[in-house]
Image (cartoon, grey):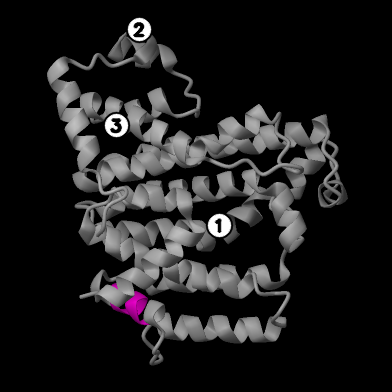
Amino acid sequence: MLNESQVEAGKEIQQRTGKTFYFATRLLPQRVRHATYVLYAFFRVADEVVDAEVTAPPAQQRERLEQLRAEALGERETDDTVLSAFAELRSRYDIDPEDVNVFIDAMESDIEKDRYRTYEELETYMDGSASAVGRMMTAVMQPDDPAAALPHATALGQAFQMSNFLRDVGEDVVERDRVYLPEETLARHGVETEQILNREFDEHVAAAMRDELRRTEALYRDGVAGIEYLPEDCQFPVLLAAVLYADHHRSIRNLDYDTLSTTPELGTARKVALLAKTAAYWAVWRDPVAVFKAVSVVPYHDEEELEADFGPGSTPTTKPQNRGRLSGWLRSLPLWGSD
C-alpha cells in the first residue's frame, strides 16, 4: 500500500513537470491516480538524469541510470521515496520487467544519440520512452482483456510523445542539441539536419512537419480505438488526455508549422474548455472514438459515417436532464480538490 509521502512526492513532480498529463490524471479513480503519480515521478527522475548532461559526464549518467534500473526492479535497496514506491507498484501490478528495461535503455540512448535516420529508428526509441510508459499505465488500470488493450496503449503512448516532439522542435535544439524529426522525412522535402539545428524555418520544413503530424494522427486514431478495452472509470480520463495532447496540433497548424522559433503551449483556459466539451459529448455518447472524432483536431476519413451515426454536424443533443447530470458530474471531478 502506497503511503502518503510516496503519493505526495510523485504528485509534486507530475504537477511541476507534466501539467497537461496532470490535468487528465486528476480525473482517474483514486486507485489509479495515486499509482500514476508514482509512475510519472519515476519516468521524470530517469529523464532528468539524461537532461543533466551539462553537469554530469556520460559515464556518470549511465551509472545513475543503472542504479535506477536495479532499484526499480527491486534488485537493490533504496531509501529514495520515488524509487521505493515504484518498486512496490511494479511488484503489486506485475509490471513487466522488460518494460522497465526498455525504458531505461531508451534513457541511456539519449545520452549520446541525438539524431534519428529513419522513423523506424525513432520508433524503436519510443518503444522504451513512450510505449513502455503506456503499457505500464495499462497494467496499473488492470483491464479485463490486457491483450486487446496493450497494442492501442502502445500507439497512444507514441502519439503523445510525437506530439511533444513536434511541439518542441526548436526547444530540443536549443536545450539539448537534439533533433527528433527523422532525417529521411527531412531529406524527402529537401531539408538538411543542419537547417533544423540553425532553426531556419521555411516551406520545406513545414512540409516535413506536415508529414510527421499526419503520421502522428494515425497513431491517435489507433490508440483511441483501444480506450474501450480499459475499465469504465478510466476511459474518460484517457480520452481527455488524448484530446489535450492532440490539441497541440491545432497550435502547430496555427503557427504554420513553425515550432523552430516558437513553442506553443496549452493554457489552462483551453484545457478547461476542452474538458467541458469532451465531457458534454461523453455524457451523451459514452463512445471514445465518436467523442474523439467530434472534439479533437485529429481528422478522420469517414466524417460522413460519423454524421450518419450521430446526426448533422456531429453535435449531440443534450436534453435538460442530461445537462443537469453533466453539470453535477463536472462539479464532482477532482481537478482542484485534495486527494
Mark 3 and mark 2 in contact? Answer it, CB < 8 Å: no
Question: Which residue is outermost to the left?
Answer: 321
In the rendered image, the vertical position of residue 93 relative to residue 337, given as above or below: below
Residue 293 lies in what quarter of the image?
A: top left
Q: Nearer the viewer, mark 3 or mark 2?
A: 3
Give whichever of 108, 82 is nearer the camera: 82
Q: Amino acid at mark 3?
A: Ala
Looking at the picture, which amino acid does disc 1 mark? Met
Of the two numbered discs 1 and 3 on the same chain, state the one appearing first in sequence. Answer: 1
**Magenta segment boundaries in residue numbering:** 84-90
Q: Is 65 on the left or on the right of 11, as rendered? A: right
Q: Is residue 297 above or below residue 29?
A: above
Question: Which secondary structure type mostly characterizes the magenta part of the structure?
Answer: helix
Q: Which residue is mark 1?
A: 126
- Residue 19 in percent (x, y) is at 47, 52
Categorize mark 2 by other alpha carbons within 10 Å: few (<14), some (14-19), many (20+).
few
Q: Position of residue 47 (x, y in %)?
A: 56, 69
Q: Is residue 168 left or right of residue 311?
A: right
Q: Amino acid at mark 2?
A: Pro
Q: Which residue is mark 2?
A: 312
User: Can you give x and y, in whole percent of width and height, for residue 218 in the image?
Assistant: 51, 35
Q: Secondary structure at mark 2?
A: helix
Mark 1 closeness class: few <14, some 14–19, many ≥20 residues within 10 Å: many
